[in-house]
Image: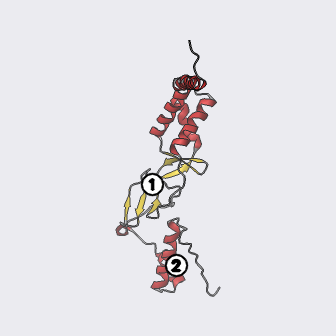
Amino acid sequence: KKAAAPAEAKKDTYKKSNKSFETDDEVEEHVKISNQVRQQLYIHYFNVGYYVYDLGVYKKNKEIIEKKILEINPNANSHLRKESLEHIRIMTYINEKRIDDRYINFQNGLYDLENERLIEHTPDYFSTAQVNAIYIEDDNLVVDPYVEKFLNDITSGNPERRKALLQMVGYSLTFRTDLQVSFFLFGPTR
């Protein structure tokens, strides 16, 4: 009989090692766990952190993922947990956070600036910042007389100044920095 050529022997070894890799229970287990976690939680891995969707915003929270892994498999050892986390990282990795300045993320929804209406939160919109306020439609808006007086006092009743001031506030709510706008307020001191 003729001996197998070295290149053929390497191919056979590779096939054998690849088959044993495919049947390795621990490898299959971490993939199963990772897939179950990703079915139950919306996760993105961005900028060396795990972000989990919660109440309309993605929050940095690796611990909740680890707890979910242990819920799925209470006997998961540290190696299996690390492998599951690594698989989740690879599957949910995003290279850069694209800031969509079309929306302002309020506690009760996303305000769509193009259509000028509030829409429901969605995990499809990767937002890590949420305005700590509830958006109220103009029809239901009750303006506090103290706020009205304050705005009139600081703008000297000038509607153009008031509009400019409200635009500055609105700009700060969008979390945009691409316009590279800065504001200087000056005037006499009291």
Residue 69 image point, x, y percent? 54, 33
Mark 1, Cα crowd under 10 Å, few <14 / some 14-19 / many 20+, is some
- Amino acid found under the numbered disc labelled 1: Tyr
| Quadrant in the picture for residue 103 | bottom left
- Assign a secondary structure to mark 1: loop
Residue 81: % across, % down: 59, 33
Q: Residue at x 53, y 50 (%)?
A: 94
* 142 vs 73, nearest the viewer: 73
x then y, percent, for residue 99 = 50, 60
Regarding residue 66, the answer to whether it shows in the image is no
Q: Nearer the viewer, residue 105 or 187?
A: 105
Instruction: Tell me how far mark 1 sits from mark 2, CA to CA.
Output: 35 Å
Residue 150's mark? 2
Q: Report the amino acid beneath label 2.
A: Phe
Which quadrant would residue 16 be assigned to in this image? top right
Q: Quadrant of the N terminus?
A: top right
**One can see residue 57 in this view:** yes
Q: Position of residue 90 (x, y in %)?
A: 54, 42
Q: How many marks?
A: 2
- Please say if 74 is above or below 57: above
Q: Nearer the viewer, mark 1 or mark 2?
A: 1
SS category of the residue bearing label 2? helix
On screen, residue 123 above or below 76 = below
Depicted 34 relative to depicted 110: above or below: above
Relative to 144, 186 lies left or right: right
How crowded pointer 2 is (Cα within 10 Å; few <14, some 14-19, many 20+) is rated as few
Residue appearing at x 59%, y 48% in the figure:
49
- Please tell me which of labels 1 and 2 falls first in the chain: 1
Q: Which residue is mark 1?
A: 125
Seen at 41% across and 67% down, the residue is: 113
Question: Which label is found at residue 184?
Answer: none
